[in-house]
Image: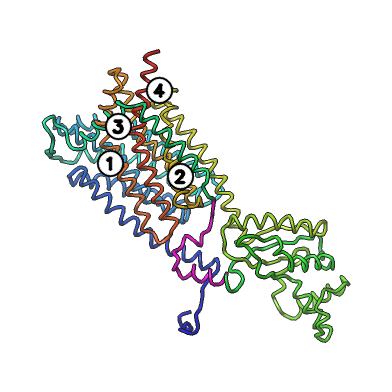
Amino acid sequence: MKRFDSSDFEIYLSGSAAIAGIFKQALLNDSVVFISLMMAVIMLVLFILFRRISGVVLPLTCVFLTLITTVSIMSIFSAPFTMATQIMPTFLLAVVTSAAIHLLAVFYKDFAHTKDKKTSLRYAMGHSGLAIIMTSLTTAVGLWSFSFSGVAPVADLGVFASSGVMVGLLFTLVFLPALISVTSFTHLEKKTDNEGHTLMDRSLLGISKVATGRPKLIVAISTVLIISAAIVATQIRFSHFPLQWLPEDNFARVATEAVDENLKGSLTLEVIVDTGKTNGLYNPDVLRVIDDVSKNINSVTSGNMFVGKVFSYIDIIKETNRALNENQEEYYEIPDDPDMIAQEFLLFESSGNNDLASLVDANYSKARLTLKTPFIDSLEAKAFIDNAQVYLDQKFGKLATVSFTGIGTLMTVTFEEAIYSSAVSYILAFSLITILMVLLIGDLKIGLISMIPNLLPIVFLSAIMVIFKMPLDMFTLLIGAIALGLAVDDTIHFMHNFRRYELQYNDVDKAVRLTLMGTGRAITLTSIVLALGFLVLTFSQMNNMFDFGVLTASAILVALLADFFLMPAIMKLIIKDKANI
């Protein structure tokens, strides 16, 4: 194109192949950027957290082995690296690092008192081992629910990302302790107050006092916020418009929009007309219906959808008929005689032109109609296809059956399948995670109630999407199950320790305080790591990845606030009521 492009001769590259090529190019470029930035963020956070080289090297070793193993598994099963699985390396970086942080945070804190590496390692494994297993299982379940999707890339994400989480669990609980046992550590002094509390310790103590001191107020405020967010969330807009994933100045998007506006469409819908019998296309009645449909199908279009032109074998028949009658314009029509139509087919075919083979099948029983359409939102296209199907069925009646295919149809069907699959994924993920939560806590009532704060991120994200006019598309549909799997991680760590202290001391306030002082620091920092990990996606060239990163990071932070304030308040109220009874 560059050889011919000039200031007075502008060339546009458009169409589905061009858009797919741009997506692939962005995928390759973004993957390198994501992994590089995420590694830098993790190294910085780990060093700030632990102030030790070992605190950086040990988790990253587990992360590196996890990524290598997971990608190797994908290679073994010949699974391609797609736009859906593009988020997997960043996701695994954050999740495996978070699991390692929980183990190392407890180990380093206990090691500062005992100065005995083996004793502290046993304590850390006993303190956080079960919680790490459960959080890995819930995260894997949230991802595994996508494996039932009818959309292949999404199903691959579910299979291999969940496998990666379990591989990371293995390295965290087996390989990381082995590394710790052969590593030399030195004692580091931390800045504390007169009571031996750091700044974060004092902040967490303050949170515990607020959460258990005013539980009714916190629950009331949370209820109002949830109801308000839920009302706003009902206005969420479904959309699947891949062209808008590209920046407005991207050459492929500019070209596609220009072609749609000036040349009546850049994509196609394919219609297959099946007469159901050999030589059925010789029937003049079938040809007349196709001719009538070609002229009038725009009557069923609406909104941004239109049919710029219809290509079919009718044009060949008309042109051949005119040529056989001395090119007189009045003979540019469909013959009434089936035998004449058959002869015209034969004449055109014997001329050496191969165009006919792309318009009809060898038995002349099926014909192809190509509808030239613009690149628009798949939901608008789906509405047109549904209306056009009814229109065509009425027009053809018993003469032929009609079906849609082609890239435009594929896009609409894919999004429809994604919506259905996501609904199944959400239900499956929530059900399995709830069961795991009840098993961990050992109490049905408390286990069920503890899932309430984990619904907050999904409700609030839906409201945020409405406020900032973000559509619910192929990628944002993934956020719900992923956010649920990640959000419940903090809940598990909190409830695992809370139940242990509450049963030991029979004092909710003290149990909350000890929980936040013990595991609150790790919960905070792992949430920060996860949020920063997904915020890395905001550096993507693609708008959809930007939205995905912002929304998932927001869900993680909302879940953190819910676990630090709403969860203790709920525990204070329900366990107090239970005691009074």
Q: Nearer the viewer, residue 386 or 569?
A: 569
- Marked residue nearer the N-terminal end (4 or 1): 4
Q: Nearer the viewer, mark 1 or mark 3?
A: 1
Q: CA distance from mark 1 to mark 3?
A: 15 Å
Asked which secondary structure carries label 1, the reply is helix
Disc 2 residue type (three-letter): Ala
Asked which secondary structure carries label 2, the reply is helix
Q: Main secondary structure of the magenta part?
A: helix
Residue beneath label 1, please? 525
Which residue: 21% across, 47% down?
47
- Marked residue nearer the N-terminal end (2 or 3): 3
Residue beneath label 2, please? 463
Q: Nearer the viewer, mark 2 or mark 3?
A: 2
Are the two marked residues, 1 and 3, in contact with CB atoms closer than 8 angstroms? Answer: no
Asked whether, in this view, residue 165 is left or right of residue 415, the answer is left
- Marked residue nearer the N-terminal end (4 or 2): 4
Query: Eyeballing the image, is 53 above or below 247?
Result: above
Residue beneath label 3, please? 128
Residue beneath label 4, please? 442
Percent coordinates x, y for residue 44 in the rendering: 23, 50
Query: Eyeballing the image, is 552 above or below 576?
Result: below
State the image quarter where residue 137 is shown.
top left
State the image quarter where residue 506 is shown.
top left
Query: Which quadrant would the C terminus be assigned to in this image?
Result: top left
Bounds of the magenta segment: 238-260
Disc 3 residue type (three-letter): Ser
Q: Nearer the viewer, mark 1 or mark 2?
A: 2
- Marked residue nearer the N-terminal end (3 or 4): 3
Q: CA distance from mark 4 to mark 2?
A: 34 Å
Say whether residue 297 is magenta.
no
Disc 1 residue type (three-letter): Leu
Q: Residues within 10 Å of mark 1 (few under 14, many from 20)?
A: some
